[in-house]
């Protein structure tokens, strides 16, 4: 009798108890009020533009939260995958350059790329020579030597072709395809690069993984910046087409609202799929690997494969979000991709909302972007009030560079925000809620 009562009490204590989501609704109401205040203060065109950019950042933040929140992988190279998405959005959507395709240069470029493909296949085959009984030290030596020879030959041939393209054609141009094609390819390319990076770097400790991904992001940016034949480099490419009617056709507000509807549908689809995956056995396995890798391996789980899956999935979302953001900005400028704007800001969004909580990540993305955008005009307003008060009361001379100082206030406000959040709510305003299954 006592034992049965004990079990009934234990079952009652462990049974999941539903509660009304007061905290979630309160934060969403506060966010809605903030968005409404921005619309009243800044107008519909400006505010809708802000929401479109925030929605693109929300896709980036969802990509980071599944890497960091689901699997504990700290990716400090978000900027690189955003740049890859923007590059694909540009390449596949801008008009075709007929002068380039009517010249012999495409054939010469294809020949060089063929050399590159053969060289990669050769190096890969040489790296597997140990299966033929070749000692590992000799295999490594041969692979490195042949790899260097292939690199020097391909680079020499490629430089001749690219110099001719830049001098005669400017750059190769685009493919003139629908915008959504560039977005899909952007996500696929980012995922493919993430697959390669994951094979090399996921065995590293989290701090080394962050350093490695940060360095790779800078390499991607440097490549896009210096490949004038492919991206026009610092000369930029604009305007980029939109997947909806542009402002010249229907006006700024309506065009941006239509663009917002596209990104909102994308977010809803991604959110639904991620929630299904999170609550499925696959998601529970990912979290088990994150929390206790040794125990998961002892249970027969393929740790490296699961970690690679989650890393690639996050990179795909980053490439997709970067493509949507690049198309909306209507310009591809490799210099415009900055670690502060495209890595650190996304990291703050995830920290504020709560790593591993998809709803919290969406909340953090919109909230942080509003703070990021509005901190400049608010700081400028406060500075002007203080300056005019000082001039009227104490005869101060009005500074001439208030705008630049107000722009710097954004960094101060974001730094202060993340400090406060880490102190008050280290797991985010909407922390991850793990359901325990008996």
Image (tube, grey):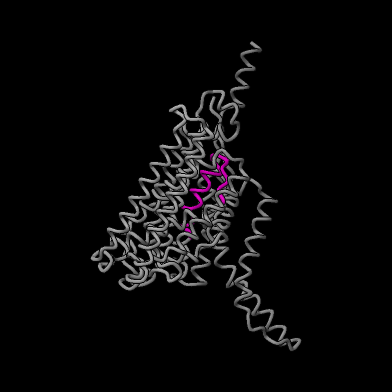
> Residue 141's x, y, as percent?
51, 39
Judged by its main secondary structure, the magenta piece is: helix
Instruction: Say left or right for 343 vs 6.
Output: left
State the residue in front, 106 or 431. 106
State the residue in front, 404 or 247. 404
Q: Is residue 314 visible?
A: yes
Quarter of the image with the N terminus is: top right
Q: Residue furthest top?
A: 1
> Residue 287's x, y, as percent?
55, 35
State the residue in front, 197 or 259. 197
Is 68 magenta? The answer is yes
Q: Residue furthest left?
A: 102
Tell me the residue at 51%/43% (across/down).
66
> Residue 389's x, y, as percent?
70, 83
Is 204 magenta? The answer is no
Q: Residue furthest right?
A: 394
Instruction: Say left or right for 263 vs 33.
Output: left
State the residue in front, 368 or 153. 153
Q: Quadrant of residue 17?
A: top right
Tell me the residue at 46%/27% (across/down).
133
> Residue 27's x, y, as percent?
57, 53
Tell me the residue at 53%/27% (across/down).
437
Q: How many marks?
A: 0
Does residue 379 sit above or below 156 in this rendering?
below
Q: Is residue 239 visible?
A: no
Magenta region: 54-76
Quarter of the image with the C terminus is: top right
Instruction: Say left or right for 72 vs 53.
Output: right
Tell me the residue at 25%/66% (across/down).
103
């Amino acid at each position: 009798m006592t034992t049965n009562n004990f079990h009934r009490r234990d079952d009652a204590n462990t049974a999941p108890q539903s509660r009304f989501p007061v905290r979630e609704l309160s934060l969403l109401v506060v966010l809605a009020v903030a968005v409404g205040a921005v619309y009243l203060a800044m107008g519909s065109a400006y505010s809708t533009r802000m929401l479109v950019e925030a929605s693109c950042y929300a896709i980036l933040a969802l990509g980071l939260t599944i890497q960091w929140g689901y699997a504990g992988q700290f990716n400090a190279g978000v900027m690189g995958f955003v740049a890859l998405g923007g590059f694909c959005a540009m390449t596949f959507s801008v008009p075709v350059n007929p002068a380039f395709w009517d010249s012999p240069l495409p054939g010469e470029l294809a020949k060089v790329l063929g050399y590159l493909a053969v060289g990669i296949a050769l190096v890969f085959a040489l790296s597997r020579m140990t299966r033929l009984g070749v000692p590992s030290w000799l295999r490594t030596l041969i692979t490195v030597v042949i790899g260097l020879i292939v690199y020097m030959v391909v680079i020499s041939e490629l430089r001749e072709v690219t110099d001719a393209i830049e001098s005669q054609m400017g750059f190769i141009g685009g493919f003139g395809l629908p915008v959504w094609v560039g977005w899909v390819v952007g996500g696929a390319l980012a995922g493919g690069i993430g697959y390669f990076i994951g094979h090399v770097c996921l065995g590293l400790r989290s701090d080394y993984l962050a350093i490695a991904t940060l360095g790779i992001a800078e390499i991607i940016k440097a490549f896009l910046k210096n490949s004038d034949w492919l991206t026009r480099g610092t000369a930029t490419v604009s305007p980029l087409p939109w997947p909806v009617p542009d402002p010249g056709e229907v006006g700024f507000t309506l065009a941006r609202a239509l663009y917002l509807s596209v990104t909102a549908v994308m977010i809803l689809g991604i959110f639904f799929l991620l929630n299904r995956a999170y609550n499925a056995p696959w998601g529970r396995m990912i979290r088990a690997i994150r929390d206790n890798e040794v125990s998961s391996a002892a249970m027969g789980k393929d740790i490296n494969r699961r970690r690679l899956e989650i890393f690639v999935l996050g990179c795909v979302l980053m490439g997709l979000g970067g493509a949507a953001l690049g198309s909306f900005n209507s310009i591809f400028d490799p210099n415009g991709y900055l670690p502060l704007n495209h890595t650190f800001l996304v990291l703050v969004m995830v920290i504020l909302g709560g790593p591993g909580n998809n709803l919290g990540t969406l909340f953090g993305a919109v909230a942080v972007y509003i703070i990021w955008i509005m901190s400049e005009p608010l700081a400028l307003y406060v500075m002007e009030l203080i300056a005019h008060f000082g001039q009227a009361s104490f005869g101060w001379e009005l500074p001439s560079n208030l705008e630049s100082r107000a722009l710097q206030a954004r960094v101060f406000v974001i730094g202060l925000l993340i400090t406060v959040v880490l102190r008050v709510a280290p797991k985010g305003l909407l922390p991850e809620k793990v359901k325990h299954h008996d």
